[in-house]
Amino acid sequence: MTSHAAALGELEGLAVLKGHGTGNDFVLVPDADGAHPLTPAQVRALADRRFGLGADGVLRVARTKDSPEVADQAADAEWFMDYRNGDGTTAEMCGNGARVFARYLVDSGLESGTSFSIATRGGARAVRIEGDGDVTIDMGVATGPLLRAMPVVSVGPESWNATAVNVPNPHAVVFLEEPDDLDALDLTQPPQAGPPAMFPDGVNVEFVVRVGAPDERHVRMRVHERGVGETLSCGTGACAVMVAAAGRDQAPAEVAYTVDVPGGTVVVTRRADEHIELRGPAEIVAIATITSAP
Ligand SMILES: N[C@@H](CCC[C@H](N)C(=O)O)C(=O)O
């Protein structure tokens, strides 16, 4: 028996769901009674694309009041998005995961109405269900890293200066001039990003090209996610890209960018109060039961 099979065996009988936001895919584990806190090995087994269900990350649906690390958000949010990367590590936030999590809460009747909040390790986040089915998340205010150094990102022999943005998970954004250069990048290995003191817990790296003229506010990106690898989309990454692009374009305080990712398109808006909103589709595509026998 593989170690993944053993870890999945511990979850025998558990009902899970599969969903995605612009191709960033997740296994959702409803856990209202806190019976399945999920070990890193269980997360890795669920996320494995060959020996498990396959996903970029896992979203455990837990009660905020029963989750000590976010219990202080219980007055704002009934449900805690306990997000894990596919390698079993945790992260402060997952923008696409938040949209998929909100879609599940509404579809399952755990939330009614079109506005509510969810708890995350990065703080409570307001959700709005749009008339066309899109889900918008208030991602809070993006910040820069405390260290005032210029990050440098390398892929193989090539290096670029980058812009560091926290949403609040860490991102390094690299602008490329040529669309062909974006398409040609080999992201099968993690890009190197430094200085190390700036990213002590690792970093997500986005590569971006402009689409059209600067005032069209339209970009295209690829991403290598910390704890996952290259993914088809990253919501916090799209927000980091928007902040970096707006700075580069000297855009007004209130501005919206269309961000194309390999799995679709999201819209990122900076409001007058500096909060960043992430809007895009989110879908639940399957429900399954963990079982070792048919
Ligand atoms: N895919 C996510 C980001 C998930 C967390 C990231 N890999 C990290 O470790 O910070 C998104 O949509 O934001």
Image (cartoon, rainbow, N blue to C red):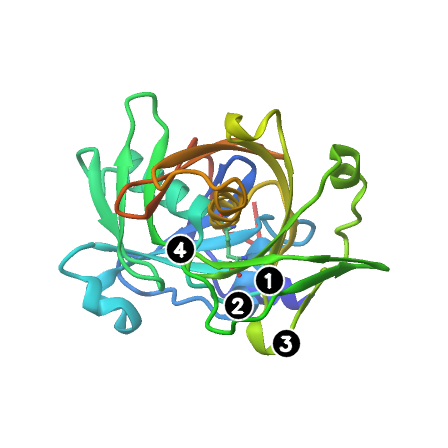
- Specify whether 50 is left or right of 237: right
Q: Amino acid at mark 4?
A: Ala
Nearer the observer, 294 or 169: 169
Lower sequence index among marks 3 and 2: 2
For label 1, the residue is 227
Q: Cβ(mark 3) to ligand 1 < 8 Å?
A: no
Question: Are dots 1 and 2 in contact, CB under 8 Å?
Answer: yes
Q: Residue 128, how many percent across, how many down?
A: 26, 36
Nearest to viewer (mark 1 / mark 3): 3
Question: Are dots 1 and 3 in contact, CB under 8 Å?
Answer: no
Q: Amino acid at mark 3?
A: Pro
Element type where label 1 sits in the image: loop
Q: CA distance from mark 1 to mark 3?
A: 17 Å
For label 2, the residue is 89
Is residue 8 visible in the rendered image? The answer is no
Q: Quadrant of the N terminus?
A: bottom right
Q: Residue 218, how many percent across, how many down?
A: 54, 30
- Specify whether 110 is left or right of 262: left
For label 3, the residue is 196
Lower sequence index among marks 1 and 2: 2
Nearer the observer, 61 or 98: 98
For label 4, the residue is 142
Q: CA distance from mark 4 to mark 3?
A: 21 Å
Q: CA distance from mark 2 to mark 4?
A: 22 Å
Q: Residue furthest front?
A: 250
